[in-house]
Image (cartoon, rainbow, N blue to C red):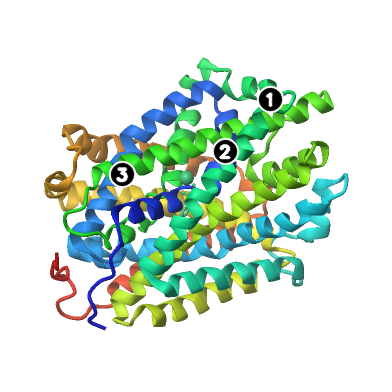
Amino acid sequence: SDQPRERWGSRAGFLLAAIGSAVGLGNIWRFPAEAYRNGGGAFMLPYLIALVTAGLPLLIMEYTIGRRYRGSAPASYLRLGRPAQFIGWWQVAICFVIATYYALILAWALRYVGFSVGQSWGDDAEGFLFGTFLQVGDTPGELGGYVGGVFWPLLAIWVTVLITLALGIRHGIETAAKIFIPLLIVFFVVLVVRALTLDGADLGLDALFTPDWDALTDGDVWVAAYGQIFFSLSVGFGIMITYASYLGRRSDLSGSALVAGFANSSFEILAGIGVFATLGFLAASSGGAVFETEGGLGLAFVAFPTIISEMPWGGFFGVLFFLSLVVAGWTSLISIMQVIVAAVQDRLRVNRVVSVAMVGTLVALVSLLLYPTNGGLYLLDAADRFINRYGIALASLISVIVVAWLLRKLPVLQRDADATSAVKLGRWWKLCLGIITPIVLGLMLIDSFAQEIDENYGDYPSSFLAWAGWGVAGGALLIGIVLSLIPWRRGAEVPPDADD
Ligand code: PHE
Ligand code: NA
């Protein structure tokens, strides 16, 4: 179809959608756990350095590529330079993998909104989660049977996401962000105020913020900080390229990136405060240490339910907490899906609704067939770990190398961004992207690769990791390369005419 490219209705609409993508499960459950494990208050230093040296520069790069080349990730990278095209398709494949399981976590959270009302987990939140609700099997890699209690909420997530995508950039994604982000702010404020007024809140805050300065000399802490920033800002997925391709030619770029980055970090730190104040209440009331959070799953679906049962107004608090997870993650899922939808639209020249129908059927089918099963949790765990490291992080590393060194496009991109942005990019931008980011990402990957060789992630059997981990991450790269070998129609290398 040769209709003009869709457009955001306003700058605020674009910003809210970008914030909606950034603010997700990573803010609510990943950040507090990472900060706590990596030096508490001292983690803020590497975190801020990672934000300034890698997160924001990459965010600005993706915004600029998207607006300049006005295409989905593969189309934009094609226009940037032919050899870069496979990065775009690789990112599309990564988004495909992530979408299938990100939706699953939303489905759990959605179900827990209902469970919170009557505190269905009784006095054994852990047994309820893994046994009664998820019905997790014993053998990783065996899908086993279907779990109806997960299937239905998952279907509901997919139906609402696909309808929103079919409504388009302005009427679907932008409208959803305009409703959901303010809603999320209200939920958050209520939750955090409630948490801070609980007995023992100060214990939790002490646990989170007491700085362990020795952590700063630990390489792992820096790796964790950069990892958190990449995941949390949603850079390296092609999402921001896609969203920025619907911007007008004269829109501000670096200012928007700063606003989005600031908003994302604010949500994150606020979530850390709320979560730890609540954990402090549990510590105070049970007289023990409850800060042994093992990542997000245990935090959200075991620790929180336990706390909800013990506090006054727990049901209400629980509904708000799980609704926040749903709302925050839902707008992120939308953004992951739009990467794939936009790529198919550009490549096959079909309209939005056809593309949503094609992509939606495929992604939702895979998601609904594999994950609401006895083996779904293991699959999610392995796929998530490997696609994060050998998908997102590796694709980001390769994209900065290709853009900065192979194609030497940073000066052009910088001029483009500076021409319309309130905040001018100084020399630091090229320095961060060309030197600091590739070095840090390279070290991160070598480090995590060594860990992989050292011991099997999660103690899973190698045969399982071979397909659910390496297979999934390698498959995404392979699909990216294969798709990039199919030639585009003539003229696709040229961005569509500017019509503003
Ligand atoms: N940035 C999101 C978060 O913090 C995560 C995300 C992952 C968003 C993948 C989009 C795509 O949770
Ligand atoms: Na985030």
Specify whether 133 is left or right of 447: right
Residue at (25% x, 48% y) in the render:
61
- Of the residues under marks 2 and 3, which one precedes in the sequence? 2
* Residue 189: numbered disc: 2
* Residue 475 percent coordinates (x, y): 46, 65
Amino acid type of the residue tagged 3 in the rendering: Ala
Specify whether 391 is left or right of 426: right
Q: Tell me if label 3 and label 1 are in contact, CB under 8 Å.
A: no
Residue at (46% x, 20% y) in the render:
217
- Of the residues under marks 3 and 1, which one precedes in the sequence? 1
Dot 1: within a 10 Å radius of its alpha carbon, few (fewer than 14), some, or many (20 or more) residues?
A: many
Name the residue that disc number 3 marks. Answer: 257
* Residue 22: numbered disc: none
The answer for how far apart the CA atoms under marks 2 and 3 are is 24 Å
* Residue 201: numbered disc: 1
- Of badges 2 and 1, the one in the foreground is 2
Specify whether 491 is left or right of 96: left
* Residue 123 percent coordinates (x, y): 88, 44
Amino acid type of the residue tagged 2 in the rendering: Val
For the question of whether residue 456 can be seen, the reply is: no
Residue at (72% x, 55% y) in the render:
112
Q: Tell me if label 2 and label 3 are in contact, CB under 8 Å.
A: no
Dot 3: within a 10 Å radius of its alpha carbon, few (fewer than 14), some, or many (20 or more) residues?
A: many
* Residue 10 percent coordinates (x, y): 30, 57
